Image: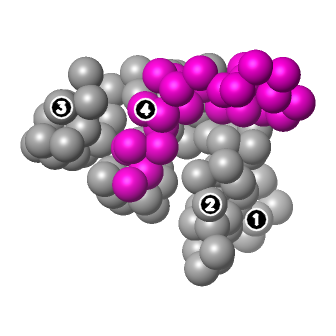
């Protein structure tokens, strides 16, 4: 009867995306719920974001300037903004990966 009260759990779009085998970081950044799920410390999302190649791509979105005349607005403004916000969500697992990865630290 709890479903009549609206107390049922509805899986987020981010969790559904992460269940796909072909999930890409850009797919997640295109989802409107990505920051909400980061702030809620979605377990699947934290596990995905805490992989070295993913942390590297997040940092690249912030630090690597796209080519002049890049037509993709997502690459020039949306992805860098969301990558920065995701890194600022106080996800300790993500920061552990960053601080323990010598190649990531040497880039700065």
Image quarter where the N terminus lies is bottom right
User: Circle 3 — which element?
Assistant: helix
According to the picture, the residue beneath numbered tag 4 turns out to be 59
Disc 2 to disc 1: CB gap under 8 Å: no
Residue 106: give its label: 3
- Mark 3 and mark 1: Cα distance apart in space: 52 Å
The segment highlighted magenta reads 53-80
Q: Are marks 2 and 4 in contact (CB under 8 Å)?
A: no
* Number of the front mark, 3 or 2: 3
Give the alpha-carbon distance from disc 2 to disc 1, as whole Å.
33 Å
Query: What secondary structure is found at the residue carrying circle 2?
Result: loop
Compute the Cα span from label 1 to label 4. 42 Å
Disc 4 crowd rating (10 Å Cα; few below 14, some 14-19, many 20+) is: some
Q: Dot 1 lies on which element?
A: helix
x, y percent for residue 38: 49, 38
Along the line of sight, the residue nearer the viewer: 60 or 96:
60
Left or right: 22, with 71 as reference point: left
Front one among 3 and 71: 71
Question: Which of the two marks, 1 or 4, is nearer to us in this view?
Answer: 4
Considering only vertical position in the picture, is 69 above or below 98?
Answer: above
Residue 83 seen anywhere in this rendered image of the structure: no
Q: Residue furthest front?
A: 68
- Which residue is rendered at x = 38% and y = 44% of the image? 55
Residue highlighted by disc 1: 3
Kindly identify the residue that appears in the image at 76 percent across and 65 percent down. 3
Left or right relative to 69: residue 94 = left
Q: Which residue is mark 2?
A: 24
């Amino acid at each position: 009867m709890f479903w009549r009260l609206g107390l049922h759990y509805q899986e987020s779009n981010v969790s559904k995306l992460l269940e796909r085998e072909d999930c890409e970081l850009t797919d997640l950044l295109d989802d409107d719920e990505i920051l909400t799920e980061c702030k809620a410390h979605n377990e699947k999302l934290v596990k995905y974001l805490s992989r070295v190649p993913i942390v590297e791509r997040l940092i690249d979105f912030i630090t690597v300037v796209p080519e002049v005349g890049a037509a993709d607005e997502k690459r020039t403004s949306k992805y860098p903004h969301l990558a920065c916000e995701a890194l600022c969500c106080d996800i300790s697992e993500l920061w552990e990966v960053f601080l323990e990865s010598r190649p990531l630290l040497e880039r700065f």
